[in-house]
Image (cartoon, helix red, strand yellow):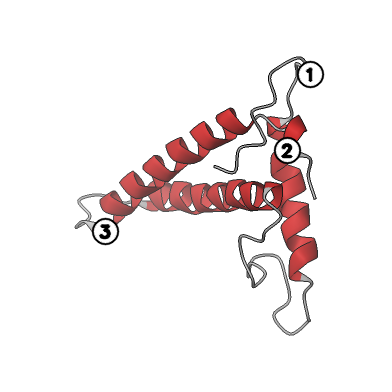
Amino acid sequence: MLNPETIDIPRLRRDLREAGARARELKRLLRSPWQRPMAAEQREQRELARHVTSLCALRASLRGKLHFTRAPREGRNPDEPCDVAAVHARLAERAARAYVRTDPAEPARAASPC
């Protein structure tokens, strides 16, 4: 499990809110009648969904929980068994690299459950 004291939780929460707002905006755009080709928006929405999933996995790991109970379909063979906890930990560790605190003297606000 990741150490919440080393993660910049306020920045993580802000980024998660911003990414969620952008994802909702893209969904609304893609659900409306298309007036032009929307391939770029579809790609952005898919990449944003992956990013939000990794941020949610990081938040869940900081609380000692799992964000998903089935491994994501991408990048795995559906016929082989998958260790969901290992996939979750790997995804959270990868996302955590961007949120490591640079100043250890910062107040430890990471202990908050929200």
Q: Marks 1 and 3, Cα distance to the nearest angstrom?
A: 45 Å
Write the residue at 67% across / 36% down: 111
Write the residue at 51% across / 40% down: 16
Badge 1 is on which residue? 104
Q: Marks 2 and 1, Cα distance to the nearest angstrom?
A: 12 Å
Quarter-of-image position of residue 33: bottom left
Secondary structure under the numbered disc 1 in the rendered image: loop
Amino acid type at circle 2 is Pro
Q: Marks 3 and 2, Cα distance to the nearest angstrom?
A: 38 Å
Amino acid type at circle 3 is Arg
Which is nearer the N-term, disc 3 or disc 2? 2
Q: Nearer the viewer, mark 3 or mark 2?
A: 2
Q: Residues within 10 Å of mark 2 (few under 14, many from 20)?
A: some
> Where residue 4 sits in the image (x, y, percent)?
73, 38
Which is nearer the N-term, disc 2 or disc 1? 2
Write the residue at 20% across / 51% down: 35
Badge 2 is on which residue? 4
Write the residue at 75% across / 16% down: 103
Determine whether, in the image, residue 36 is placed left or right of residue 19: left
On screen, residue 14 above or below 65: above
> Where residue 10 sits in the image (x, y, percent)?
57, 29
Which is nearer the N-term, disc 1 or disc 3? 3
> Where residue 101 sits in the image (x, y, percent)?
73, 24
Secondary structure under the numbered disc 2 in the rendered image: helix
Badge 3 is on which residue? 31
Q: Nearer the viewer, mark 1 or mark 3?
A: 1
Nearest to the observer: residue 4 or residue 49:
4
